[in-house]
Image (cartoon, grey):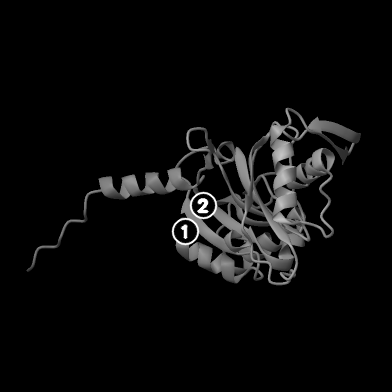
Amino acid sequence: MQRIRLRYTKRGRLRFTSHRDFQRAFERALRRAEVPMAYSAGFTPHPKVSYANAAPTGTGSEAEYLEIALTAPRDPEQLRILLDESLPTGLDIVEAVEARTSGLADRLTASVWELRLDGVSQEEARRAADAFTAAETVEVQRLAKNGVRTFDARSAVVSLEIRDLAETHSPQADRPTDQPCAILRLVVRHVTPAVRPDDVLSGLRAVADLAPPVPAAVTRLAQGLFDEETGTVTDPLAPDREAAQARSTAEPPAAATAPA
């Protein structure tokens, strides 16, 4: 059984697609592309698809991951093209590698988020970010299944920086640009309970009374292992690519056929 790991995006209006909606669209794409899927056992077999740490509904993402199990080998790049053609524009399959290592979910320990705050000046955003990072704890509340939950949003935040609008990586062509606009770059560890971008925005409002006049446009730029030395989030598919490269290098070339 071959396992393929995919990176996909949620762009434009499809950032409002829920995780369940994406699951349905992806399973339809698997059928259209005639992917030889492995199925679970039992009374209600379903395709063996493992989703990892999906972004909240309403946020864009350049770094969503999943893994599928196949009953017959397929070229990862050809499979990527077929699946991408079978999905709507905005839900794009941008990378595919054969799984040659274990524990993809274990390598998703942090995320890089970009928050676009229309109507907020850079000076106002910087003041709020400084107040947030200077605080030891920033308690916020979130409505959960069992009622309102209070937790610390500060401890999970590794860094919070202000970026120029020209440095933004999340295309927002439908958002106005003739007004003040601040871009926040946020690195957050994946902890329990999960600290989401809207929790950080609640924290900014609590410590500095920062309240954007319009909802923030949020995009996940990356997720993976957090490197303590460099302070960066590493590519979770890199170990699989390196293992594939090492295997191809170690394999002896095919023997040439002697001329008759």
Left or right, residue 257 beside residue 92: left
Residue placed at 84% from the left, 44% from the top? 209
Q: What is the distance, in whole Å, between disc 1 and disc 2 at their CAs?
A: 7 Å
Mark 2 is on which residue type? Ile
Q: Is residue 218 visible?
A: no
Left or right, residue 110 beside residue 99: right
Find the residue positioned furthest to the top: 136
Q: Is residue 93 visible?
A: yes
Mark 1 / mark 2, whichever is N-terminal: 2
Q: Secondary structure at mark 2?
A: strand
Which percent across, then down, holds residue 32?
62, 69
Q: How many marks?
A: 2
Mark 1 is on which residue type? Pro
The numbered disc on residue 4 is: 2
Quadrant including the C terminus: bottom left
Find the residue positioned furthest to the right: 147
Q: Secondary structure at mark 1?
A: helix
Q: Which residue is mark 1?
A: 76
Q: Residues within 10 Å of mark 2 (few under 14, many from 20)?
A: many
Which percent across, then down, holds residue 124?
75, 50
Q: Residues within 10 Å of mark 1 (few under 14, many from 20)?
A: some
Residue placed at 72% from the left, 34% from the top? 154
Which percent across, then down, holds residue 176?
75, 70
Please state which of residues 43 and 106 is positioned toward the viewer in this rendering.
Answer: 106
Find the residue positioned furthest to the front: 123
Residue placed at 44% from the left, 60% from the top? 75
Left or right, residue 35 beside residue 151: left
Residue 162 to residue 104: above or below? below
Residue placed at 48% from the left, 38% from the top? 230
Please state which of residues 240 and 119 is positioned toward the viewer in this rendering.
Answer: 119
